[in-house]
Amino acid sequence: MRIGIYGGTFNPIHNTHIEIAKAALNQFNLDKVYFLVAGTPPHKDTAENIDDICRVEMVKLAIKDMNNFILDDREIYRSGKSYSYITLSELKEEHPDDDIFFIMGSDSLLNFSNWVKPEVISKCANILVAPRLGDDIETLKEKINEYNSTFDGNFTFIDYSANGIASSVIRERFYSEEAVRKDMSPNVVNYILEHNLYNPCTYSYDDILRLSEEMKKALKPGRYVHTLGVATTAYSLALKWNYPAYTAMVAGMLHDCAKCISDDERLTICKENNIPISEIEYKYPHLLHGKVGAYFCGSKYKVYDSQIAHAITYHTTGCPNMNLLDKIIFVADYIEPGRNKQPRLDILRTTAYTDLDECVYMILEDSVTYLNENPDMVDPTTIETFNYYKEHKKEKR
């Protein structure tokens, strides 16, 4: 067999990565191309606030309908720095009778002689080089001729139309210029949005400590303890479901930030800031604490992430088609360690880490049962959300 190995950080993977792989597949009659997701290379920081598993998941989504493309995630599980010579040696040992072709960008070619043990890499594989837009082709040709006379294996160009698409540009402009999203698979775009990747609003443990002190002042002691429970549960769920963990923890820390103000204050804030008030919220103004809390995020606590505000708005009622953070906060508020009166909590706490949508449905089911026993307190949004997830559950079956 003829096997292509396409290594990269894929942070994120975009259409040019796919085009290069397809060009190599066709030009060199490859049987398959492995997308080798880089672990921690010695020459760059791959993370940039993105979990390794998120890069793996994006590659899976980008190539899922392409039979000749295969994910290889071995490097992200390797301890320490990942050197290409180690991976290529492993692959050659796994495929001793196959021809291996290592795909790299022209920037990597120019620095190849400075890599660790380049002679081992070139002995294990032929090197296929993808030029980039604006490259000095003559310089690249000279470098290829030099390496062909210096190293084993064969160095040659991949014939494809280079363009200016770059992962760094996508990361920088994803939220400010939606046009860059067309350079990726729609599945990858949706994953980035759902998992809140590359958002310029990022948070650290220092933010958690700051907001914890703010909540200690703003909330009654019992509500503050509950808030800490929600924040830590949200952090744990975020780790499980590959969402930025500190972002989830900030949302958990602020979810009840408007809980301990008076009903009159909540109504006044909504009226003064054109925050809509439903009939049930006029009757029971305490239900407005989510909407007012979302407003407080930016106005009072300098937290400007729109996903956080949205999750806080709906953390009690839920809403149809909740995004991932919405679900995390909705569930964390219900199952945090201090809760002890809700039914089937042990089942819910287990299900939250195995099927988040199922957990959301079960909580809504219990909430609707409770509200049916207290009909004057029914918020139509909760009923609408329950009906949405009831249909969603049927469709999943």
Image (spheres, rainbow, N blue to C red):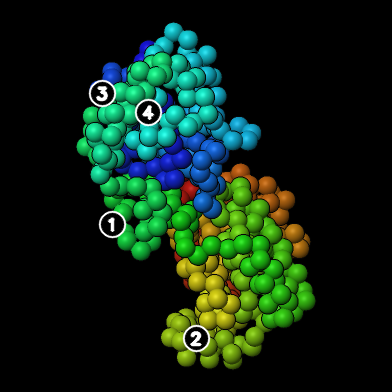
Residue carrying label 2: 270
Residue 8: x %, y % from top left: 44, 36
CA gap, disc 3 and disc 2: 61 Å
User: Where residue 117 sits in the image (x, y, percent)?
Assistant: 52, 24
Residue 371 visible in the snapshot: no
Residue receiving disc 4 = 103
Q: Amino acid at mark 1?
A: Ala
Instruction: Write the residue at 61% across / 59% down.
Output: 246
Q: CA distance from mark 3 to mark 4?
A: 13 Å
Three-letter code, disc 3: Asn
Tell which circle, 2 or 4, labels the residue nearer the N-terminal end: 4
Looking at the rendered structure, the number of numbered marks drawn on it comes to 4
Kindly report the distance in space between the C-alpha atoms of the residues bearing marks 2 and 4. 57 Å
Q: Mark 1 against mark 2, which lies toward the viewer?
A: 1
Q: Reading the chain from its start, which is encountered first: label 3 or label 4?
A: 3
Query: Is disc 1 surrounded by few (<14), some (14 to 19) or many (20+) residues within 10 Å?
Result: few
Locate residue 359, reporting x and y percent.
59, 52
Asked whether the residues under the numbered discs 4 and 1 touch, taking CB atoms below 8 Å apart as contact, a structural biologist would say no
